[in-house]
Image: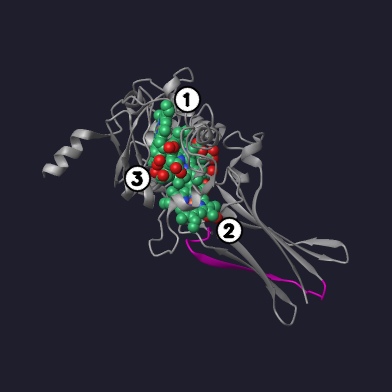
Amino acid sequence: MKKILILCALSAFAMANMHFEKNKKCSECHPTIYSEYKTSQHGKATIFKDPIHGAVYEKHPQYNKKEKYRCGHCHTPTADNLSALLKSNNGVTPDADNETQNEAVACAYCHRIEDVKHGVAMNKNLVSLKEKVYFTSKSNPGTSPFHGIKTKKSIFKDGKMCIGCHSHKSNKKEFQVCATDLNNNASKKNCIECHMHKVDGAPSTMSTGKTHTFHGFPGLHGDLTNLSQYVTMNISNTSDKKMFTVLINHDVPHASLLHPLRSSKLVVTVTRNGSVTKMQDRIIAKTIGSIKDGKPVPTPPWLATQIVKNTTIPANTKKAFPYAWDLKSGDVITAIFGYYLVKPKALKKFDLKENKEATKFRVIRKETFTVK
Ligand code: HEC
Ligand code: HEC
Ligand code: HEC
Ligand code: HEC
Ligand code: HEC
């Protein structure tokens, strides 16, 4: 009981408005980490810096009724008027001139997460009230002239600090729009190991360290080079040469697409004597929606009550894509697997047809195979 009381006194659910040091301040001594972070989705999570987030919010009833900005829990957690943004029907919506709203998922916010509590609609981050003491996973961290450092191994080492925002989110209809559903039996299940790998460069200007954890947070937006080691492909054909299979080995402890906007595509061609034949594209996606006239139809997330269709590759699963095709010795099969941030079918709905990021096909893997 005593322990619980002490914890309550030192940290708060990030509902109330709290003050956080600015990202720019950190850049003075952590320039490398800052430059990686600035171009990451954490650095750009606001409606002003992320046109895709902005486009979806603009269609949201919360925006149209000037009702609230519930997204702020995770997209602008250090806004100095966060409680007003989250409160219903007070006319307060995001403001591009508010500097604290542009801080997005700020450095100081992440490094003040003390613990994560389970919630029904979404999880909650328990944020330390000590403005200038930052958590790390290191047992023997250095010292900083600007801030205190406290070791918080449990959640900064195993990735629990990520799941305050990345675990799940339900809409008003109590339907879970997205969920990371980590496979706890996986051998590799630490978010930080895969999404914050070690790269060259000192963690600070005052450090003798030669490497640091990468703060570009690669995901579908970023450079997929490092993540591609977890998504491999294998092509094989049957001995009668009437069929071949592309096997995707998704060695990841969460499903292949986490956000309902996304989709993947498997593009396969067969080349014979220089002429290329394209197989039908295989689309992989999760569609959420509701029942209309007795039939399931796709809807935006805020209207969804159920999963309409789900072909995403589950955690740590191999999925085979068979193709019936008469092959000959020497035929070259090429398979390309990649993602769209926004499903081509949803581009119109969110006015994103002209947006380069939203429409780009992002390749994670390409394999070729020659028929013997
Ligand atoms: C005046 C320089 C300075 C400023 C400004 C500064 N830091 Fe640091 N920080 C350091 C030094 C020095 C260390 C010790 C570790 C090292 O040698 O790199 C450190 C260590 C850390 C660590 C622990 C790293 C570890 O060793 O595991 C974190 C986390 C951290 N800083 C976050 C921040 C954040 C967030 C900000 C901005 C709000 C910030 N720092 C601003 C100098 C600074
Ligand atoms: C519980 C935390 C949380 C809340 C609340 C939340 N989001 Fe997000 N949002 C996330 C996370 C985490 C991601 C990254 C997920 C991913 O890429 O799979 C994300 C990603 C997105 C993206 C994709 C952005 C891109 O550039 O690809 C959109 C769009 C989005 N959110 C819209 C919204 C809107 C609109 C709201 C409010 C109505 C909202 N979110 C509320 C956590 C949240
Ligand atoms: C999404 C959460 C998140 C954000 C945002 C974030 N960090 Fe980190 N940071 C982490 C985690 C997790 C680690 C790795 C565990 C550890 O070493 O403590 C880490 C590690 C560090 C380290 C130690 C690096 C090393 O490898 O020695 C420093 C220093 C640091 N962060 C500073 C910053 C600064 C400065 C920013 C903003 C420019 C920032 N962080 C933004 C989560 C975050
Ligand atoms: C305060 C909430 C919050 C925390 C804590 C947080 N994230 Fe995020 N994360 C987000 C939001 C919001 C987005 C989406 C921003 C956008 O695209 O607009 C995001 C985006 C990402 C993306 C990019 C996805 C893509 O499609 O490119 C990755 C990867 C990611 N987070 C990993 C992590 C990891 C790993 C941790 C823990 C070290 C973590 N996040 C902690 C809120 C958070
Ligand atoms: C074994 C490595 C691995 C681990 C562990 C891992 N991921 Fe991923 N993650 C990936 C790969 C690879 C992708 C690319 C998409 C896919 O799954 O095919 C990805 C994609 C993502 C995305 C982007 C998805 C989207 O739809 O935009 C987010 C966000 C993310 N991971 C967050 C997390 C979080 C949070 C954790 C921990 C709870 C985690 N990941 C653990 C490898 C990993």
The quarter of the picture where residue 370 lies is: bottom right
Q: Residue furthest top?
A: 97
276 left or right of 234? Answer: right
Instruction: Identify which residue, 226 or 28, lies in the foreground.
Output: 28
Q: Is residue 350 above or below residue 276?
A: above
Q: Residue furthest right?
A: 273
Is 327 contained in the magenta span? yes
Q: Which residue is mark 3?
A: 140
Q: Secondary structure at mark 3?
A: loop
Q: Which residue is mark 2?
A: 229
Looking at the rendering, the stretch of residues picked out in magenta corresponds to 312-330
Question: Type of residue at label 2?
Answer: Gln
Q: Residue furthest front?
A: 208
Q: Give ligand 3's quarter of the image.
A: top left
CA neighbours of label 3 inside 10 A, class few (<14), some (14 to 19), many (20+) = few
Tell me if label 1 and label 2 are in contact, CB under 8 Å. Answer: no
Q: Earlier in the sequence, mark 1 or mark 2?
A: 1
Q: Position of residue 114 (x, y in %)?
A: 29, 40
Q: Position of residue 236 (x, y in %)?
A: 68, 73
Q: Position of residue 112 (x, y in %)?
A: 33, 36
